Image (cartoon, rainbow, N blue to C red):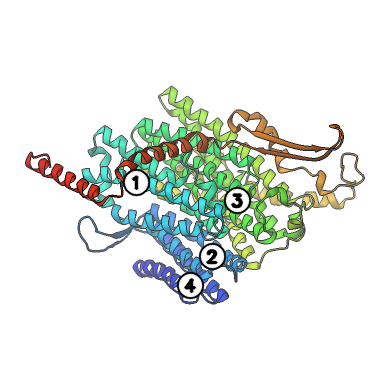
């Protein structure tokens, strides 16, 4: 099939889905099938197209225009890789959405969401396909605005409107920095075409080159959710419908990583040491603080949103280590670090989208996001529990699932810093390995809490007591991504080879033959360390019958659950999420700054309490000490300009006259 027709087929199928959503919006069931079957078909075409380009040549479509507005599409192996990630995730979420949207039947306009859903996926594909900076900014803004309307889909809720406002402000601030970075590169190249930006770092002065890097880091870092630019994530992801949250967290924030790779490596050259060091520090802070704040959350979607901050940090650790190796003139080691980062990128897309769909299934069935109000769901929702467990194991980086492979690669990329000649940099990179180890341990603890408190023990409320399994299409969507989590884990040797073909044109060398051998994946140089998740999986399958044999052998005994001396256990004496996370909250109290409030009422004596209420929350450090003072300063400065707003037409005419006089004087004196 001609790739041009295939690409146009993707675009028009999404557009058809959007149009049908508008036309059929009066019939909830028809519009649901039309919208999401269209996005499903387009996703299938996207997967076929992306693999065709990844194993073929660069695909280009040029649209005639001026030198500035020369729009076009250029899809190389890196773009194709991101289209593949977007399409696989969108395929699963589209199937899931057919069942999920029944929750909104008769309550919301399904056609409105279907239209935005199809256009949102299309905009992400166009973002990673754009060959021109102006076209990129247009589709980037289109993606941001559409996602804003998706976030505020339930706009009748005040917290949803607040989340949308924070998101749209942050994303437009980020866009401003992106434009500045592009303008610096365009001023040197004389064109806005990305082809002219290739290697532009060599033509820029060191100061302009650094500015282009910093502006790109701030702009794309805002969309990616790096600390401290992350504050929109814990608001926007919980506010959006869960199928939208799966796309936003799973793939939308990855479009920022796509452009970071483009700008840092291909455009600017990634040859400045302090760039990699700065990105490494930011990545470690993001990964650590992301998982630390996730541990304190009891809202399951806010918990997952903070884990997006964590995993973006892990992805950027791989990228930053690669940049450090590039600046040291070691492209093979740089390729290994970049492969680690890209591997974790696709892994995060799979297990985070799966977990958000799992959270959506919980909310669909129980109508609550509060983990403390759940419990016992494994008996009510066994398939959802199974899929959520796979996602939890994957994000906790346990073998042989996919999260383990990419974190193993990232650890080894950090260990390879012993090949650097700068001892201080080596110590810093090795220290980042300790940060990654702590992040992994805290992530595992967090998902023991999330899964255990939500699915195990007894139901704590009527919400959990009345839960039931979700529709089959929702289970099918989760099942696809669960399968991908397993596949990306046990076929690591094959996936690494594919990712090497993506990274090789970027860093200038391929290492597939060095890091893969048979069913094994290793490091450079020549298998300094290696592992085979395929063999681990086979051994697990081999020993899996052993627990069943032991259970049926009659050597086990059953006893009543210990209930602290009570004759029987109830939901009132179960372990809570607050109790589970309290040791970590006390250990990291200087960071969390926890606040406790205790309210008690007494009978006739202070020895006898009639009621007791305990509240605990942690301090929103970045909002309280960074954003709120900045907002107050901005408002104060804005209020000082009120003096010029007199309400008098004569004053406004005087302002215009004064500006004209100043311009005339400047022209006469040659100032303009």
Up the image or down, 393 lies above or below 130; here it is: above
Instruction: Tell whether label 1 touches label 3 (CB within 8 Å).
Output: no
Q: Alpha carbon of mark 2 to alpha carbon of mark 1: how far?
A: 32 Å
Q: Which residue is mark 4?
A: 21
Badge 4 or badge 1: first in the primary sequence: 4
Up the image or down, 513 lies above or below 10; here it is: above
Mark 4 lies on a secondary structure that is: helix
Left or right, 4 with reference to 477: left
Up the image or down, 588 lies above or below 536; here it is: above
Q: Alpha carbon of mark 4 to alpha carbon of mark 2: how far?
A: 14 Å
Q: Disc 2 or disc 3, which is closer to the eye?
A: 3
The crowding category of the residue bearing disc 1, from other C-alpha atoms within 10 Å (few below 14, some 14 to 19, many at least 20), is: some
Q: Which residue is mark 1?
A: 176
* Residue 431 x/y as whole percent: 52, 28
Q: Disc 2 or disc 1, which is closer to the eye?
A: 1
Up the image or down, 34 lies above or below 217; here it is: below
How many numbered marks have been drawn onto this rendered protein structure?
4
Q: Which residue is mark 2?
A: 94
Q: Disc 4 or disc 2, which is closer to the eye?
A: 4
Q: Alpha carbon of mark 3 to alpha carbon of mark 1: how far?
A: 29 Å
Q: Which residue is mark 3?
A: 301
């Amino acid at each position: 099939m001609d790739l041009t027709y295939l690409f146009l087929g993707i675009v028009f199928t999404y557009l058809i889905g959007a149009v049908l959503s508008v036309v059929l919006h009066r019939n909830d069931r028809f519009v649901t099938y039309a919208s999401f079957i269209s996005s499903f078909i387009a996703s299938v075409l996207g997967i076929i197209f992306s693999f065709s380009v990844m194993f073929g040549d660069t695909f280009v479509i040029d649209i005639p225009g001026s030198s500035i507005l020369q729009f076009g599409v250029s899809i190389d192996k890196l773009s194709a890789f991101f289209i593949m990630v977007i399409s696989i995730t969108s395929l699963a979420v589209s199937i899931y959405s057919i069942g999920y949207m029944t929750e909104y039947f008769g309550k919301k306009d399904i056609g409105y969401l279907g239209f935005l859903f199809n256009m949102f996926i299309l905009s992400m594909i166009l973002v990673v396909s754009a060959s021109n900076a102006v076209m990129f900014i247009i589709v980037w803004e289109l993606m941001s605005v559409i996602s804003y309307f998706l976030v505020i889909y339930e706009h009748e809720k005040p917290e949803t409107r607040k989340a949308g406002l924070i998101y749209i402000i942050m994303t437009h601030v980020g866009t401003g920095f992106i434009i500045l970075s592009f303008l610096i590169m365009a001023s040197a190249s004389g064109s806005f075409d990305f082809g002219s930006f290739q290697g532009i770092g060599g033509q820029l002065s060191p100061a302009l080159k650094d500015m282009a890097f910093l502006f790109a880091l701030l702009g794309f870092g805002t969309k990616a959710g790096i600390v401290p630019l992350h504050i929109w994530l814990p608001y926007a992801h919980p506010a959006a419908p869960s199928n939208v949250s799966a796309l936003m967290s799973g793939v939308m924030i990855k479009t920022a990583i796509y452009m970071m790779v483009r700008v840092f490596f291909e455009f600017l050259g990634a040859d400045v040491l302090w760039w990699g060091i700065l990105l490494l520090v930011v990545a470690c802070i993001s990964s650590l603080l992301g998982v630390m704040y996730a541990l304190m959350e009891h809202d399951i979607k806010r918990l997952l949103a903070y884990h997006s901050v964590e995993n973006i940090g892990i992805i950027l650790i791989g990228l930053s280590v690669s940049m450090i190796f590039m600046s040291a003139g070691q492209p093979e080691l740089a390729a290994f670090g970049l492969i680690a980062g890209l591997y974790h990128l696709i892994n995060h897309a799979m297990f985070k989208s799966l977990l958000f769909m799992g959270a959506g299934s919980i909310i669909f069935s129980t109508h609550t996001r509060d983990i403390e109000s759940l419990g016992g769901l494994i008996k009510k929702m066994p398939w959802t529990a199974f899929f959520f467990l796979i996602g939890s194991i994957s994000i906790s980086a346990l073998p042989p699932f996919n999260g383990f492979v990419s974190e193993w690669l990232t650890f080894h990329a950090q260990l390879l810093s012993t090949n650097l000649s700068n001892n201080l940099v080596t110590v810093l990179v090795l220290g980042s390995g300790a940060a990654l180890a702590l992040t992994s341990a805290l992530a595992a603890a967090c998902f023991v809490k999330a899964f255990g408190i939500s699915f195990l023990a007894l139901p704590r409320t009527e919400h959990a007591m009345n839960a039931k399994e979700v529709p089959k299409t929702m289970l099918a969507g989760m099942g696809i991504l669960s399968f991908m989590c397993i596949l990306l884990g046990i076929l690591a040797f094959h996936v690494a080879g594919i990712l090497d073909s993506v990274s090789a044109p970027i860093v200038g060398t391929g290492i597939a033959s060095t890091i893969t051998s048979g069913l094994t994946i290793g490091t450079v140089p020549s298998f300094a360390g290696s592992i085979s998740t395929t063999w681990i999986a086979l051994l697990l399958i081999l020993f899996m019958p052993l627990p069943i044999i032991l259970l049926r052998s009659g050597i086990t005994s059953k006893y009543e659950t210990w209930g602290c001396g009570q004759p029987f256990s109830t939901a009132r004496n179960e372990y809570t999420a607050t109790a589970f996370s309290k040791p970590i909250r006390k250990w990291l109290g200087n960071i969390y700054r926890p606040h406790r409030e205790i309210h008690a009422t007494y009978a006739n004596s202070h020895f006898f309490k009639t009621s007791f209420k305990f509240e605990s929350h942690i301090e929103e450090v970045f909002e309280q000490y960074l954003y709120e003072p900045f907002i107050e300063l901005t408002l104060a400065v804005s209020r000082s300009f009120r003096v010029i707003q007199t309400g008098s037409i004569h004053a406004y005419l005087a302002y215009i006259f004064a500006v004209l006089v100043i311009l005339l004087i400047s022209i006469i004196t040659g100032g303009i």
